Image (cartoon, rainbow, N blue to C red):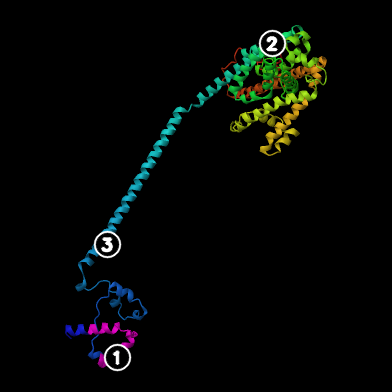
Amino acid sequence: MDDDDQNDAKMALIGDQSEPEPALDSRATRAATTPSDSASVEPPCLPATSKLHRRLSRNPSLSDSSSHHEDWDPLPPPDKLTVLDLLDNFALPQQLEKLQRGISAQTDKVRRSKDALKSKTQSARDRMVEEWRRRAPSADEQLDRYRQRMRRRVDKLGKQWNDTKAISIREKISFICAVINIFISGYLIGGFPQHFHVWYTLQLVYFMPIRFLTYRSQGYHYFLADLCYFVNVLLSLSIWVFPESKRLFTAAYCLAFGNNAIAIVMWRNSLVFHSLDKVTSLFIHIMPCATLHCIVHLLTPEEQRERFPAISIIKNSSPGSPAAYANVTSMLTWSTMPYALWQLGYYLLITVRRRDKIAAGRPTSFTWMRRSYSNTWLGKLVLSLPDRLQEPAFMTIQYSYAVLTMLPCPIWFANQIASTAFLSVLFAWSIYNGSTYYIDVFGKRFQKELEVMKSEVLKWPNMQDPTFQPSSTTPPNEGIAFGASPSKH
């Protein structure tokens, strides 16, 4: 059979396959074909299947093909090859080789980076260890430093134990001035009461700037707005600016003998001679009372009439007259007004405008009393309230306390003996607080310092240098008697 016949047969076969008739199994077709048909018709030779034909040949209708070579021939016949097929066969190995080279290059780069990082880390660690070894002292150097430090501490302890000048110069001056102040005040009260208000004013001019500078540097300057300073201002105005004002004098007298005087007990003011701060606090609370006692009870009627006309009018006025302020109603009324003015100003200027600073830790009288009296029933009652109600509750309690302390003021104003007894009790209370400070606070503080030094020195003998000898200020056997009492010094 020539080539034309074969091509015609191929086209006929393809046309038959394109018809929608169901495909027959190739084996059944060959079985049904007679020998004469097989002898006369030569089997067709199909071309190589393409990729699309290979995918389509997976259908069940073609899965039973008798020739695996015909269905899955990987290469087209040589007459069907193109240049692109050849280029594709060459391009795939080149791409694989390029990808392999890129992976190898990245692997080498990562390995080099890892080695470089490891080298830098090792060198940095070596430098750090070398620097630490160079700077860190050896065991012998540390031992020498410890011995020197312990020598200095032992010498310092011996000096403090044997030296009678442990108190600073400022505390000595404060001690001397406080004692002299008491003698001068007592002398003026007994011999020249008409000049005591001058002595009070001079001390006020001296103590107030010191208190302001001290509290300002320590962050306690909000205490300078407390009622005790306001009372001293009122008394100064009544003495030097408005001596004829009966209402101003009544307010100053009630607040001084009331809230300001009882604060010696409530705030535990103490007569500690060597402490300028405590002497100043006691002066602020007790000296206004002493000054008013002098100008009310120790001046002659002529001196009162000439120098303090308001006092003379109040003392000589008959009950029920408009000038009769020496009664409970008038005293509470005219003292409540300046107290309310002070309380409102304190709340607006300190509590409201400085709320952020107070929350940051600036102390005030309210925060101090809330901390000091937190364990008492009254403190627990205030702290049990919401935060927004604690300050109004504190102000209400403070006003009630002020009214209670001012109720006996007509008695102190009318009776000299009662006023003297009241001042004596206040002064004795301050002395008691001072003795408590010296014995319980100052003595225990010194004892704690000795115990700390003792614990440090007891660690020292285990590392002590055999060639070391104690300082001459500390006798070897009895120079440091930790159980001894420092009372002889």
Read off the residue under disc 1: 33
Secondary element under disc 1, as helix, strand or loop, is loop
Which residue type does callout 2 highlight?
Answer: Trp
Which part of the image, by quadrant, shows the N terminus?
A: bottom left
- The answer to whether residue 95 of the structure is visible from this angle is yes
Tell me if residue 349 comes above or below residue 20 in the rendering: above
Question: Residue at label 2?
Answer: 199
Reading the chain from its start, which is encountered first: label 3 or label 2? 3
Marks 1 and 2, the one that precedes in the sequence: 1
The x and y percentages for residue 476 are: 64, 15
Q: Mark 3 points at which residue?
A: 92
Query: Dot 3 surroundings within 10 Å: few (below 14), some, or many (20 or more)?
Result: few
The answer to whether marks 1 and 2 mark residues whose Cβ atoms lie closer than 8 Å is no
Left-right relation of 367 to 122: right
Residue 472 horizontal side relative to residue 184, left or right: left
Q: Which of 268 and 212 is in front in this view?
A: 212
Contact between labelled residues 2 and 3, with CB atoms less than 8 Å apart: no
Select label 3 or label 2 by which is in front: 2
Span highlighted in magenta in the image: 9-37
